[in-house]
Amino acid sequence: MAGKFFVYIITSILVIWSLDSININQIFKKNRILQARVFYFLLTISLIYLVTNFIMDLFTSLKLY
């Protein structure tokens, strides 16, 4: 369980760092700041969850964990 926590931390840093390179201001309408922030937050949480579960499933299927 401690290993999954560290994978979550590392994945969180990488996902936030990679999403920082996207200019999401061009995607949303003007004056929709709150909606853009909620979307960015949900996208971040979703990617963190998906990538972490992929890494953990990969480790368990390869018997590395």
Image: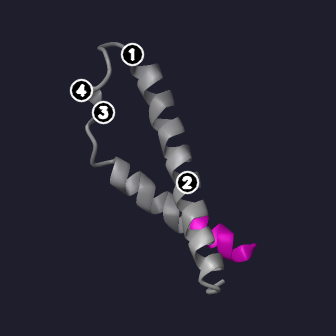
Q: Residue furthest front?
A: 61
| 60 left or right of 35 in image | right
Amino acid type, label 3? Ile
Counting residues from the N terminus, which is met first, the one under dot 1 or under dot 2?
1
Label 2 secondary element? helix
Q: What residue did someone put label 2 on?
A: 50
Alpha carbons under labels 1 and 2: distance apart: 27 Å
Q: What residue did someone put label 3 on?
A: 24
User: Marks 1 and 4: in contact by CB < 8 Å?
Assistant: no
Amino acid type, label 1? Arg
| 44 left or right of 57 in image | left
Q: What residue is shown at x 50% (from left), y 63% (from top)?
A: 11
The percent position of residue 58, horizontal first and vertical second, equals 57, 73
**Quadrant holding the N terminus:** bottom right
Alpha carbons under labels 2 and 4: distance apart: 25 Å
Counting residues from the N terminus, which is met first, the one under dot 2 or under dot 4?
4
Label 3 secondary element? helix
**Quadrant holding the C terminus:** bottom right
Magenta-colored span = 1-8
Q: What residue did someone put label 1 on?
A: 32
Label 4 secondary element? helix
Amino acid type, label 4? Gln
The percent position of residue 27, horizontal first and vertical second, equals 29, 26
